[in-house]
Image: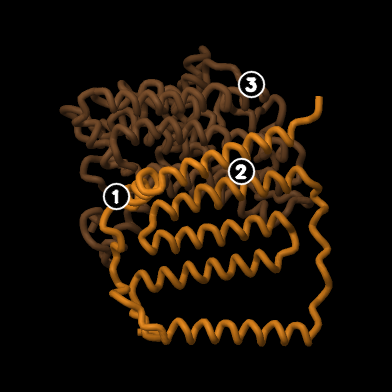
Chain colours: A orange, B brown
């Protein structure tokens, strides 16, 4: 038992994934080259996908990999490649000691409050279930989208199509 | 120990998974070596040449010699390259190519296969990470040929991923599952037989999009020798170059295995053992890819993107519509 958590494969996996997410996030913030930042973001996306899969939402997790770690990253890298290589931003100078201490204190207070609130809340049900959903998540999502929320889904797709066509029209050169 | 599909996860099964992964890795390295040999022999034969025949009997050890040469070569990093990116890009490109093999059902007993409920999606999702490795390699080399190769491959692979996914959708509609094991067993009992028959349009789109995803002739614009030297890996040498080549050929095997599973009935077949059927069908698929390479000239860059967006995607969408309508009527 670690802080009241049973040490199982799932717990270990969770902490490893959390570590990956945090380390990649810190890299993303501290690196100065935009391309390196984009690659650290891939680590965050993959870690989050891992968390989804750990929670039993395998479909959402893999869509996360495909859309974010794959497509969105390529889009960012593509945009960066088309812009200048020398854009490796000269960020603002060092943060002063006063501001640093203040930031640290406020973050510490927020983390402490959150931890206290989470630890003191009585959570219902068992937390060790390996199969949280009673059937395949693909079926559940399909039922929700195409049965329960059909109209909303179709409206969203119409909005996205309009946005796509609009982007193409705006981007087209005047002739 | 190896029957992890049906039993809960224990340390024993975890150990079995590790052993399985190592066995598959070595198997794949062996397959890649002989795929390259096979490619050179087949294309040589088709172009009225002899092909490799010096190292070992019939040149069988030629690929082994090539691999040793690459491993022993100096690993040159260009002075103006982006060093960390240059070093990890081949790894980013290779790791997903090996990971996708986890869901391929090689045999009827599902040895070394993950029974993933979203197997098809897993393949498509992971293979899209490889593109990041290729684009980064092209960018980090700080070389104009590499950069153009990287840009081209990003545009091409993202574009052709859409028809690839759409062409698989017809199969998923017929089988009613994203699980590759289920898709194979469904084909055994389907009244139309293997899905290549009811999904012939989907199969054609799948093969074309697969060749484009693999950056192979006639879609090898990212590494077009006559215009871009070698495309995104122009600056790579030694074992990092080998990593890119390895990723490319592992994908040749993986996409052939996926096509076999989705359209050709996977390990299904009479008389022979299931793994042998799988090997025969996958080899036929790989042979077809080489045949196309030996026969077709490279297409132009402006034809390439137009073909994906104006021909393949509408055809794939039409196939989905047709599949849906037919499965309602029949």
Give percent across and percent down for residue B131: 58, 43
Residue appearing at x 79%, y 78% in the figure = A95
Residue appearing at x 68%, y 67% in the figure = A29
Q: Give whichever of discs 3 and 1 has the lower sequence position.
A: 1
Asked which secondary structure carries label 3, the reply is: helix
The residue under label 1 is: B115
Residue appearing at x 53%, y 43% in the figure = B68
- Say which quadrant the N terminus of chain B sits in: bottom left
Q: Looking at this view, name the residue that lies furthest to the front.
A: A151
- In this picture, residue A51 sits left or right of residue B79: left
The chain holding disc 1 is B
Q: Give whichever of discs 1 and 2 has the lower sequence position.
A: 1
Give percent across and percent down for residue B116: 33, 50
Asked which secondary structure carries label 1, the reply is: loop
Q: How many marks?
A: 3
Query: Which corner quadrant of the image does residue A100 belong to?
Result: bottom right
């Amino acid at each position: 038992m670690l802080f009241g958590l049973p040490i199982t494969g799932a717990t270990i996996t969770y902490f490893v994934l959390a570590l990956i997410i945090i380390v990649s996030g810190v890299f993303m913030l501290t690196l100065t080259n935009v391309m390196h930042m984009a690659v650290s973001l891939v680590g965050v996306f993959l870690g989050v996908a891992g968390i989804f899969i750990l929670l039993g939402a395998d479909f959402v997790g893999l869509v996360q990999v495909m859309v974010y770690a794959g497509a969105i990253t390529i889009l960012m890298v593509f945009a960066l490649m088309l812009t200048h290589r020398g854009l490796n931003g000269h960020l603002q100078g060092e943060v002063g000691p006063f501001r640093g201490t203040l930031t640290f204190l406020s973050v510490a207070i927020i983390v402490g409050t959150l931890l206290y609130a989470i630890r003191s809340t009585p959570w219902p049900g068992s937390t060790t279930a390996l199969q949280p959903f009673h059937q395949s998540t693909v079926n559940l999502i399909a039922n929700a989208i195409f049965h329960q929320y059909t109209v909303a889904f179709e409206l969203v797709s119409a909005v996205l199509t309009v946005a796509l066509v609009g982007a193409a029209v705006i981007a087209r050169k005047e002739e | 120990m190896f029957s992890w599909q049906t039993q809960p996860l224990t340390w024993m099964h975890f150990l079995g998974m590790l052993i399985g992964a190592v066995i598959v890795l070595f198997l794949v390295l062996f397959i890649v070596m002989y795929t390259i040999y096979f490619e050179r022999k087949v294309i040589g034969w088709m172009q009225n040449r002899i092909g490799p025949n010096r190292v070992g009997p019939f040149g069988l050890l030629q690929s082994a010699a090539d691999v040793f040469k690459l491993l022993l070569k100096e690993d040159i990093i260009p002075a103006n390259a982006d060093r960390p990116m240059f070093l990890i890009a081949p790894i980013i490109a290779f790791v997903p190519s090996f990971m996708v093999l986890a869901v391929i059902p090689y045999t009827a007993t599902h040895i070394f296969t993950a029974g993933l409920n979203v197997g098809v999606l897993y393949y498509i999702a992971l293979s899209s990470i490889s593109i990041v490795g290729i684009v980064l390699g092209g960018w980090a080399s700080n070389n104009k040929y590499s950069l153009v190769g990287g840009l081209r491959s990003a545009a091409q692979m993202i574009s052709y991923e859409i028809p690839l996914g759409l062409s698989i959708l017809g199969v998923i509609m017929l089988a009613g599952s994203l699980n590759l094991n289920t898709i194979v067993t469904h084909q055994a009992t389907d009244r139309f037989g293997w899905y290549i028959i009811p999904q012939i349009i989907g199969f054609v789109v799948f093969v074309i999009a697969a060749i484009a995803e693999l950056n192979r002739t006639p879609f090898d614009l990212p590494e077009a020798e006559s215009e871009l030297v070698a495309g995104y890996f122009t600056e790579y040498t030694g074992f990092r170059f080998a990593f890119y080549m390895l990723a490319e050929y592992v994908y040749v095997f993986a996409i052939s295995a996926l096509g076999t599973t989705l359209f050709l009935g996977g390990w299904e077949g009479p008389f022979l053992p299931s793994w042998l059927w799988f090997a025969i069908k996958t080899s036929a698929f790989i042979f077809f890819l080489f045949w196309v390479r030996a026969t077709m000239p490279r297409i132009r860059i402006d034809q390439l993107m137009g073909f994906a967006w104006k021909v393949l995607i509408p055809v794939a969408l039409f196939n989905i519509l047709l599949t849906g309508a037919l499965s309602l009527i029949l």
